[in-house]
Image: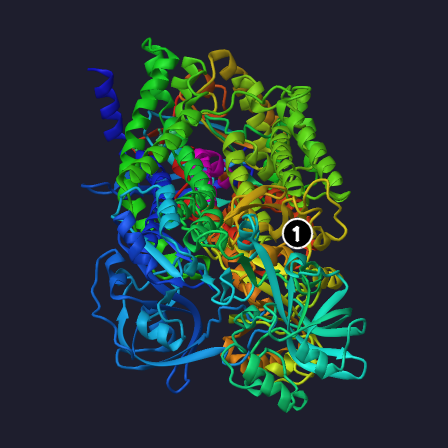
Amino acid sequence: MKARDLVFRSLVFYARTHAGVVLGAALASTILAGALVVGDSVRASLRRFADDRLGRVAFAMAGNERFFRAALADELAARLNLPVVAALQLPATATTAEATARANHVQLLGIPPDFWKLAGHPASFADLDTNTVLVNERLAGQLGLQPGGTLLLRTPKPSLLSREAPISPQEDASTALRLTVGAVLRDDQFGRFSLQANQVAPGNAFVSLAHLQARLELPGRANLLLVGAEPGQAIATNRVAEALHQAWQLADAQLELRTLPATGETELRTSRVFLEAPVANAVLEMPQARGILTYFVNELRCGSQSTPYSIVSALPPGAYPGGLADHEILVSQWLAEDLSAKPGDSLSLAYFVVGSRRQLEERQHTFTIRGVIPMTDPLADRQLMPDYPGLAKADHCRDWDAGFPIKLDRIRAKDEKYWQDYRGTPKAFITLGTGQQLWSNRFGNLTAVRFPAGAEATSRIEARVRESIRPAGVGMVMQPVREMAAAAATQGQDFGQLFLGFSFFLVLAALILMGLLFQFGVEQRLAEAGTLLALGFTPGRVRRLFLLEAGVLVGLGSLLGVPAGCLYGRAMIYGLTHLWQSAVGTPSLFYHAAYPTLLAGAAAGAAVAWASAWWTLRKQFQRPVQELIARGAELEPAGPPLRQKTSPEMLLATFALVGGSLVMGAGALGTDYAAPVFFLAGALFLAGGLALAGLLLTAQATADGAAHPGLAGIALRNAARRRQRSLATLGLLACGSFLIVAVSVNRLDASRQADQRRSGTGGFALVAETSLPVVHDLNTPAGLEFYGLDATALAGGSAVQCRVREGDDASCLNLNRAQVPRFLGVPPEALQSRGAFSFATVARGLPADQPWRLLSRAGPGEPVPVIGDAASIKWAMGRSVGDLLTFLDERGRPFQARIVAALANSILQGCLVMAETDFIQLFPSETGCRFFLVDTPPAQAAPVSATLTRAFRDVGMEVTSASRRLDAFNAVQNTYLSTFQLLGGLGLVLGSVGVALVVLRNVHERRSELALMVAMGFRVRAISRLVLWEHSYLLLGGLGVGTLSAAAAVLPALRSPGGGLPYVPLLILLAAVVSHGLLWTWAVVRVALHRPLLAALRNE
Amino acid sequence: MAAQPLLLELRNLAKAYPAGEEGKPLAVLRGITLGIAAGESIAIVGPSGSGKSTLLNLVGALDHPTSGEVLFHGRNLAGLDELALADFRSREIGFIFQSHLLLPQCTLWENVLLPTLACPGHKPVEPAEHRATRLLARVGLKDRANHRPGQLSGGERQRAAVVRALINSPKLLLADEPTGSLDRAGAQNLAQLLLELNQEEGVTLILITHALELAQRMGRILELVDGQLHPAQP
Ligand SMILES: Nc1ncnc2c1ncn2[C@@H]1O[C@H](COP(=O)(O)OP(=O)(O)O)[C@@H](O)[C@H]1O
Ligand SMILES: [Mg+2]
């Protein structure tokens, strides 16, 4: 007979005892494998979503408000030998024909037929005709659309000149399209197309590119360029960028180079009116280039005479043959006559500048007339007027759309005549320096650059302009979207780890339970072990035999854990897509398990189970052989443990309790890390409490008897009898209840103190988001009036308007790792003066008293200060406060941003907030505001919300209560907590089953003592009570130690807004565990004591 | 002696255990009739499996007879319900078994006082603590009150078990092979102690033993053979 046979015989003989061990190991493997499978599934789902949304698209250039030539796609395709598609991508709002349903954040895509070649599974949708729209499932679902149904889309009519620029027309701000739904596209039909990584599909509407170009009056233009590649085909970003550089033309940046027939000069101008700074700077470096700034002024006045609405040019001094000083002005003959002005007179000029909210501010500047030029002078050049969209094509002055109310009564017949004869010929000239001082704005400070005739050939100039600007200079940057999507999906929220964390306690409980069962089995067989020892086996060898046996059991268990883990994983995915959907935001996660993952989970389960068997066995078999043989299962501790002066437990208890108090004291003094510090204190208390419980049990085992012993005291003594067993159960319950209570304090309730500034809502009642930008100031009557509202619309409240640069949602609502987060441009002062929101952390070394002020940049070279939500920074972006991050600005130039502070759980989750001034510099073409924090008396919130929704319908405003929005964010964390609590609660239930097992075992071991007590005349009820008491000590002691230590850990959270213990659910949970444990104990006692005990008294 | 009122009277006592798999019920006791006066000391001997423990359990109200009656002070135990029987055991009977069955985690003091917890309402003439001190001193364990059973020798443990059996001042002490796990000297000592306590405390003693030597020191010896009790030759 070999050791193998011995192990086999034992396995068969003790099959019943072993079942518990197999079950324990199976449970551990199931939970571990299942948790990992959840991670696999989420990752696989995110990868599939990424494939679905991008198809074959590897690079993309989203121009937003920049419209390049659609033909660029073909030129690029030729150079790259890859499919390239140009499309239009615009925000839109959608309604059904009867306006029964509405969707605000719709992505309207004007696409050519080739677009479908970029789909993952090339699908062909015949050339879309003008009235057809294809919608994706999300949009169809939102609006209840069927093929054949009617869809109304409203989208901003893009203007080449930003609506925030001066002299920008405001009429016709949006275009409506009435279309018939041709088909509803599934995800695998490219319906999910999006450049943003998010597991929630956008609402997509696909229409014919040609049709959209026509409706938007953008013939031949596009703002989205997609470069396709075969799956797995690697293409260097450089190569694409280089090809773009080769292919792009000035027209793609709305730049135009033309020769002026009158003078032979070459002029660079733009349909955006103002040359962007990078373009202007690059071009001005070329020899002989002259910058020109031409502006529209409201009035030219000389004494009592005035001329309305005129064009004035600012030219470099060299342009004036006689020279011109900065305070001087040259007037045209026409103007001099109109104003009866002569050289030396002072002439004042009134003009509008535009504030950041499109508030028009009229300013004045006074000049001295230097001279009068005849209308035939070359300076009087009607080409100087830039192509103001609202002016250039007007036949009459009264048709002008300058973006502000033109006072028609001021326009005289002679002004109309001038417009007929001279169009926009400037009536006056000043120096460029002065002009730029007066009229520079964020869109630029030049309207044209001219090169003298004969300086260089136009084609040479063009080549040099193209060379010096490069496409990135005008915001044409190819993003490696496929790479970014892969990164976003793989670095995304690791649900495997998350669920491992959630299941941690459950695994622990399973292991402790298994350890107990294993130990019982071993104890039953101590005599066998003793016999082996007597036969000459060494203790080590006996232990190895037992471990070998355990190994077989554990292996068997973990094999069972593989299929069970799959089921468990499926159950978790079902939970995530059904019960806990608010944590993932999508019902479309699917189950996916990779074999290595399952095996890893099972192996880990086996390893920990085997380790716990090893732990159980580590001190067995060291007793004298005779004792092992003679006493076997009935083995009692030989005597009380020796009283030691300082036991390790004493040290641990003292250290942990004192340490915990110190840490807590330090925490109470105030620290940025209150939560972790208090958690540490709680954990120390837990350790100390457990050590104390151990000491108490030891003391019970050695203390002198009470003079008047009672049943309760005897029960306590009994609990001390199997110290390790008692401590295991007590510890299990303590750890479990500690975790559950300590963690549950993180449950967030947005409605608590929602009206307070320091709460997560910032004290704002409403949050509004629009699909299309709002350029007016909602805090002025004029701004409100523009949207047909009167001054009372906000019920005496006000709004903080924020600019938005779309990016990946960096909030917990996005399972992907945000690659480029959404940026918000806020007016810091508006938030600081309100004291809105509270801050979790402020970067080291910065003053923490007015964190919003930290958004103002120290100097132009400094990193841009940004503020984010603490959770978003940490989890969604994987960063921390103080970090320097590099992003690309609108023109593709890298800029550095430093996270200066983190907000405590707020409605600003998911984005990085910067000062509006920085925002405008970095993203100048992001027009207007699309995010609004609205202050209004709580009682007025509902009517104000209704008013805003109605008035801003055309820009797709969605108004939500701030606390509801916060709730949506909180729901994620709360759902995680529920999951954790559910699994933790299961662990505790398992723990209370452990108590019952211990009871069973204890009662079994003490059968004869209990029988003796019956003989002594104890009633069975009294004996049950004794046993029940003994085990209630363990149950209540464990829960008590755990809950009290947790109370220390959660102290700071109790004091923060939005925090607070969910007392009721917690109490219910703890009560459930206690009653569950007591129920089991009671049942076991009943069953055990019901059997005739007498047999136990028999002497044999 | 005959004038003494009977403490215990067994009338035609029979006990049969339900049969196992096959066969008829196992009749262990077949009509035992016996009277025992207060203060007597009786040894019951008989081969192993003859039903000695069964008889003792019936006397101690731990089990019910198949037929016949057990009268204690003239009162029929059959008329008592479980609660009354528990009460009866706690006040009137003291048990000693071969195994001491002391609670290992409790001190001797607690162990000997354990039976007083069985019926907390009971107020004996002599307070339990007083009696415990006295009896522990009497059996020579005065200084060991705070020791655990694990720290005592086998004989000492059995003596502690004797004190525990006597703590409630029972009228009847039932000892089922109490010396079974002791060596010869230990057995002699224990028997001597039991006899002395029988005298001093006036407690009636029924002792089951295999050792004839011990049995012969008792007032009378009864032998259990074939389910019947016969007086044996001392
Ligand atoms: N609970 C029981 N069920 C069935 N048979 C029993 C039971 N208790 C004792 N017996 C049987 O009754 C007989 C007498 O047992 P017992 O009174 O313990 O003998 P003694 O104490 O004289 O050795 C034995 O044959 C034993 O097997
Ligand atoms: Mg017997």
Vertical position of residue A835 compared to residue A798: above or below: above
* Front residue (pair A666, A988): A666
Figure quadrant of residue A1065: bottom right
Residue A1048 highlighted magenta (yes or no): no
Q: Position of residue A344 (x, y in %)?
A: 81, 71
* Front residue (pair A576, A352): A352
Q: Position of residue A1020 (x, y in %)?
A: 49, 47
Q: Position of residue A200 (x, y in %)?
A: 40, 61
Q: Position of residue A824 (x, y in %)?
A: 58, 59
Does residue A212 appear to the left or right of A559 in the view shown? right
Residue A725 appears in the rendering: yes
Vertical position of residue B9 compared to residue A415: above or below: above
Does residue A382 appear to the left or right of B200 in the view shown? left
Does residue A665 appear to the left or right of B16 in the view shown? right
Is the residue marked 1 within 8 Å of ligand 1, measured from its CB? no
Instruction: Give the dominant element type of the magenta stretch: helix, strand or loop.
Output: helix
Residue A1004 highlighted magenta (yes or no): yes
Specify the subunit that label 1 lies on: A
Q: Which residue is mark 1?
A: A1053
- The quarter of the rendering in which ligand 1 is drawn is top left
Q: Which residues are magenta?
A: A990-1014
Vertical position of residue A281 compared to residue B29: above or below: below
